[in-house]
Image (spheres, grey):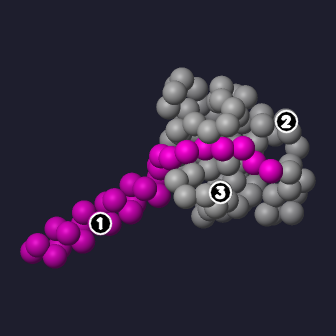
Amino acid sequence: MKALILATAVLTAVIGSARAESGIASHLGTRTASGRALHDGELTVAHKTLPFGSRVRVTNHANGRSVVVTITDRGPYVRGRVIDVSAAGARALGFSGLTRVSVEKVGTGS
């Protein structure tokens, strides 16, 4: 019985983390892992595991701003960071440098 309760708690944590996660956001570079050039005005992000084309809502904890963006790249590869946003995404979220965010999957791309 204890093993079943523990397994249920672990599964709930894994499922919950698949829908939303929190951590640090930073800025993207100039070229994406999907092969696309990064255009400054696009609302795009890099995420370690979600499929290219997935849509996520990113919410800035500091000011409550949120924006829906598309995953076009892999990363970030710095411990504690959950997402890298384009310059347009950072402007929409009202930050430069680093900020704490929540990331929630809202749909898949075309």
Q: CA distance from mark 2 to mark 3?
A: 20 Å
- Crowding at label 2, few (<14), some or many (≥20) Cα neighbours within 10 Å? few
Total residue callouts: 3
Q: Position of residue 56 (x, y in %)?
A: 61, 46
Q: In this rendering, does residue 35 appear at all?
A: yes
Please name the residue that numbered disc 1 is placed on.
10
- Crowding at label 1, few (<14), some or many (≥20) Cα neighbours within 10 Å? few
Q: CA distance from mark 2 to mark 1?
A: 40 Å
**Residue at the spot x=51%, y=27% of the render?**
62
Please name the residue that numbered disc 3 is placed on.
76
The range drawn in magenta is: 1-29
**Residue at the spot x=24%, y=66% of the render?**
8
The quarter in which the C terminus is drawn is: bottom right
Q: Nearer the viewer, residue 79 or 46?
A: 79
Q: Position of residue 19 (x, y in %)?
A: 47, 52
Q: Nearer the viewer, residue 98 or 54?
A: 98
- Looking at the image, is 43 positioned above or below residue 21? above
Q: Position of residue 29 (x, y in %)?
A: 80, 50
Q: CA distance from mark 3 to mark 1?
A: 25 Å
Secondary structure under the numbered disc 2 in the rendered image: loop
Please name the residue that numbered disc 2 is placed on.
41
